[in-house]
Image (cartoon, rainbow, N blue to C red):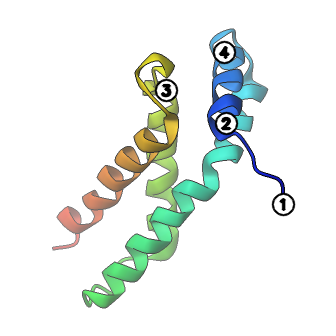
Amino acid sequence: MANVDYDALNRQYYEQFKSGSVQALEAMIELNRPLAMKYANRFFRAAQREYRPSIDREDAEQLALIGLWEAILAWDPERGGLSQLIIWKAKNQLASIFKTNM
């Protein structure tokens, strides 16, 4: 598979999204979904090792997608890449599971 310049694509889609393109928002979500799912799955496996069987994989995935959504809405391309913001927002959302399942 060819290397994809995610930063350039995200910036292109972001400009289209800010101009009102719903398709650009959907494209950004689909482009960055694998990153969010990576952290959801990593979190789920860690939760299982911590003996927290009440944490569901689908819940973790949904929270990571909420983090992805929040990251896209909060992103300022002038301040850096989107991927780090996605990771930060997804981790914050996923951490909320531990707070509610104590």
Give the residue furthest to the top: 19
Image point 62% across, 13% down: which residue? Answer: 18
Report the amino acid beneath label 1.
Met
The mark lying in front, picked from 3 and 4, is: 4
Q: Residue 40, percent across and down?
A: 47, 65
Under circle 1, the secondary element is loop
Mark 2 vs mark 1: give the one in front: 1
Amino acid type assigned to the residue bearing label 4 in the image: Glu
Give the residue at mark 1.
1
Decide if residue 40 is on the left or right side of residue 34: left
Label 3 and label 4: CA atoms lie apart by: 12 Å
Question: Which labelled disc corresponds to residue 12?
Answer: none
Q: In terms of secondary structure, where does tag 4 sit?
A: helix
Rendered image: mark on residue 73 = 3
Q: Amino acid at mark 3?
A: Leu
| Front residue (pair 54, 43) | 43
Of mark 2 and mark 1, the one earlier in the sequence is 1
Q: Which residue is under mark 2?
A: 28
Vertical order, 39 against 3 (above or below): below
Q: Position of residue 50 (x, y in %)?
A: 25, 86
In the displayed structure, would residue 83 be above or below residue 14? below
Q: Position of residue 70 (x, y in %)?
A: 44, 36
Residue 2 x %, y %: 83, 53
| Mark-to-mark CA distance, 1 and 4 | 26 Å
Quadrant of the rendered image containing residue 47:
bottom left
Q: For mark 4, what is the residue?
A: 15
